[in-house]
Image (cartoon, rainbow, N blue to C red):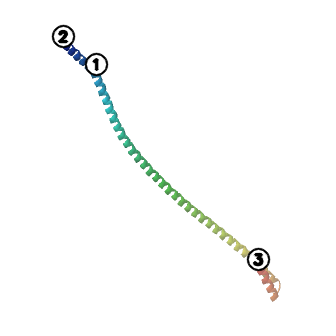
C-alpha cells in the first residue's frame, strides 16, 4: 500500500502545485502577456494612424506649397501689371511735360520774334525818318540817292 499512499500523496502534491502555479504564476503571467499583447496591438495601431497622418500631412503640405506658389505667381503678376501701369503713367507724364515745355519754348520764340519785329520796325522807322530828313534838307541827286540807299542798306 505504500505505493498507493505515495501515489495519492504525489497526486495531491501535483494538484496542489498545479493550483499554486495557476494561481500565483500562470494567472499573473497570463495577465502580463495579455497586457503586453494589448500594448503591442496599441503600438501597431498607433503606427498605422501615424502613417496615415503622415500621408495626410504630406498631402496637405503639397497642397499648401502649390497654393503658396499660385499666390506668389499672382503677386508677381500684379507687381508686373503695376510696374507696367507706373511706367505708362510716367511716359504719359513725361510726354505731357515735354509738350508743355515745347509749348512754352514756342511761346517764348514767338515773343522773341515779335520783339525782334518790333525792334526792326522801330529801326526801319528811324532809318526812314533819317533818310527822309536827309532828303528834305537838300536836293537829291542820283549820286545822293544811291548813297542814301547804300547807307540805308548798310544800316538794315
Residue 67 screen position, x and y as percent = 42, 49
| Marks 1 & 3, CB-CB < 8 Å contact | no
28 lies above or below 68 = above
Residue 66 screen position, x and y as percent = 42, 49
Badge number at residue 147: none
Label 2 environment density (alpha carbons within 10 Å; few <14, some 14–19, many ≥20): few
Sequence order check: which comes first, mark 1 or mark 3?
Answer: 1
Sequence order check: which comes first, mark 2 or mark 3?
Answer: 2
35 relative to 87 in the view: left or right:
left
Residue 152 screen position, x and y as percent = 77, 81
90 lies above or below 28 = below
Label 3 environment density (alpha carbons within 10 Å; few <14, some 14–19, many ≥20): few
Residue depicted at 18% across the width and 10% down the height = 2
Would you say residue 141 is visible in this rendering? no
Residue depicted at 34% across the width and 35% down the height = 46
Residue depicted at 54% across the width and 59% down the height = 87
- Between label 1 and label 3, give the one nearer the viewer: 1
Q: Which residue is mark 1?
A: 24
Amino acid at each position: 500500500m505504500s505505493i498507493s499512499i505515495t501515489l495519492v500523496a504525489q497526486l495531491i502534491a501535483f494538484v496542489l502545485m498545479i493550483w499554486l502555479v495557476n494561481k500565483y504564476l500562470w494567472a499573473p503571467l497570463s495577465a502580463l502577456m495579455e497586457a503586453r499583447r494589448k500594448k503591442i496591438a496599441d503600438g501597431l495601431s498607433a503606427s498605422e494612424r501615424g502613417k496615415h497622418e503622415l500621408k495626410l500631412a504630406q498631402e496637405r503640405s503639397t497642397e499648401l506649397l502649390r497654393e503658396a506658389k499660385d499666390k506668389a505667381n499672382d503677386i508677381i503678376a500684379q507687381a508686373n501689371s503695376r510696374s507696367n501701369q507706373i511706367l505708362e503713367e510716367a511716359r504719359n507724364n513725361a510726354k505731357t511735360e515735354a509738350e508743355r515745355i515745347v509749348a512754352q519754348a514756342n511761346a517764348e520764340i514767338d515773343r522773341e520774334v515779335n520783339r525782334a519785329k518790333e525792334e526792326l520796325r522801330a529801326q526801319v522807322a528811324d532809318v526812314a525818318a533819317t533818310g527822309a530828313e536827309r532828303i528834305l534838307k537838300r536836293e537829291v541827286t542820283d549820286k545822293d540817292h544811291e548813297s542814301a540807299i547804300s547807307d540805308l542798306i548798310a544800316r538794315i
